[in-house]
Image (cartoon, rainbow, N blue to C red):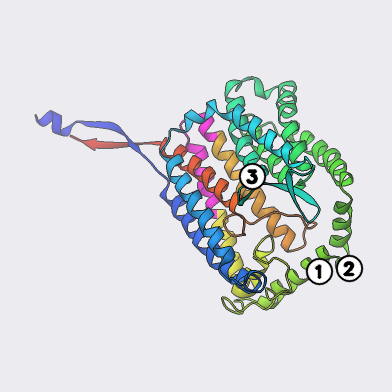
Amino acid sequence: MGRRRNRTKQKKTKYCDYSLFFLIIFLLGFGLVMLYSASAYSANNTHNDPFRYLRRQGAAAALGCAAMLVISRIDYHIWIHFGNLAYMLSFGLSALVLIPGIGSEAKGSSRWLQVGPVNFQPSELAKLAMILFLSGLVCRIPRQIGKFSNLIKVMMMILPIFVIVAYENLSTGIIIMGIAIVITFVASPKIAQFVAMVSVGLVGGGVTFIMAKGYRMKRIDAWLHPEEYPSETAFQTIQGLYAIGSGGLFGKGLGQSMQKLGFVPEAQNDMIFSIICEELGLFGAICLILLFLLMIWRLMVIANNAADLYGALIVSGIMAHVAIQVILNIAVVTNTIPNTGITLPFISYGGTSTSFLLAEMGLALSVSRGIRLEGSSHD
């Protein structure tokens, strides 16, 4: 009996990353507050309803949270069987968008499908599909992925969805390609071959897709000379920079932005970071960036401790999605890169983007539940 009490045995303790969960909830809540602040004036003027965007975003967030909670309780290994289906579905829906009369067009680009009263953006599904498809594909050939010839074959398989998305939505195409590069790099971290591939992709693909749409060259001109280029893109950029500069260190106060009063077009969308800077100042902007960095760190911890390669690749893809999208959005708002339509995760208005991003977070939480901590107990 005494020997039994003194005996120490190792046990496996289940783990769930509640830090990531609370970060998600906090960012969602903060995003809804800033969305209302940025959109109430324009929504009231345009639709006679100051709560229009808040109500729609709240519904999308609620739907996304429900999906996140359900997916987090499902064993993530089941999704390896649906990767190919998700890829084909996203490719088909993205192709439908390009057909005249089917896709909904806005600002010269056709990016949405009308599903009843809801506008659905297939490119958001394509991001999730790429994570599931490529993670499953790499897991089936983990040893062969290190060969450069096999790596080229894998990249050729993801090229169709990249091309069809990037044709109308280059920024989302960049995110999809970034996800693919990170996942393959995690599986086979050979720096030289990835530098070569990224260089060729940036130069060749960038030039091709910029020339495919005339307005992209105009955006580059507006980026280089915003004060001299009389266009809506340059106007939005300049007004966004005014908002950032006028916020100072601690901002004008929540709800006190002047630039959202018709100066920054659609301030609740891509340019919401400029309103955050104006109302909460440099301090608020840095705090938000630190929250995103903390989220990326938690995703990195989950990926590093995942029970298997498939889980690590899924979370690595999610981490790449969040990181690239945050970097691109802030770079656009600060005029570091040419203006392109990319939302700030959890903050900007966009029901499809928010819902699918929360579904991805459910996958990350599911992977975290698969982590087993070694502990000791005394009987």
For mark 3, what is the residue? Answer: 124
Q: Is residue 309 magenta?
A: yes
- Rendering coords of residue 116 (x, y %): 61, 48
Q: Between residues 305 and 158, which one lies in front from this camera angle?
A: 158
Task: Give me the disc on residue 230.
Answer: 2
Are the residues flagged by discs 2 and 1 in contact, CB closer than 8 Å? Answer: yes
Q: Between residues 198 and 23, which one lies in front from this camera angle?
A: 23
Left or right: 111 as drawn, with respect to 250: right
309 vs 47: above or below? above
At 55% from the left and 68% from the top, the residue drawn is: 51
- Rendering coords of residue 43 (x, y %): 63, 69
Quarter containing the C terminus: top left
Q: Secondary structure at mark 1?
A: helix
For mark 1, what is the residue? Answer: 235
Q: Is residue 9 magenta?
A: no
Left or right: 159 as drawn, with respect to 250: right
For the residues labelled 3 and 1, the Cα–Cα distance comes to 28 Å
Are the residues flagged by discs 2 and 3 in contact, CB closer than 8 Å? Answer: no
Q: Quadrant of residue 262?
A: bottom right
Q: Quadrant of residue 221?
A: bottom right
Question: What stretch of residues is rendered in magenta?
Answer: 294-312
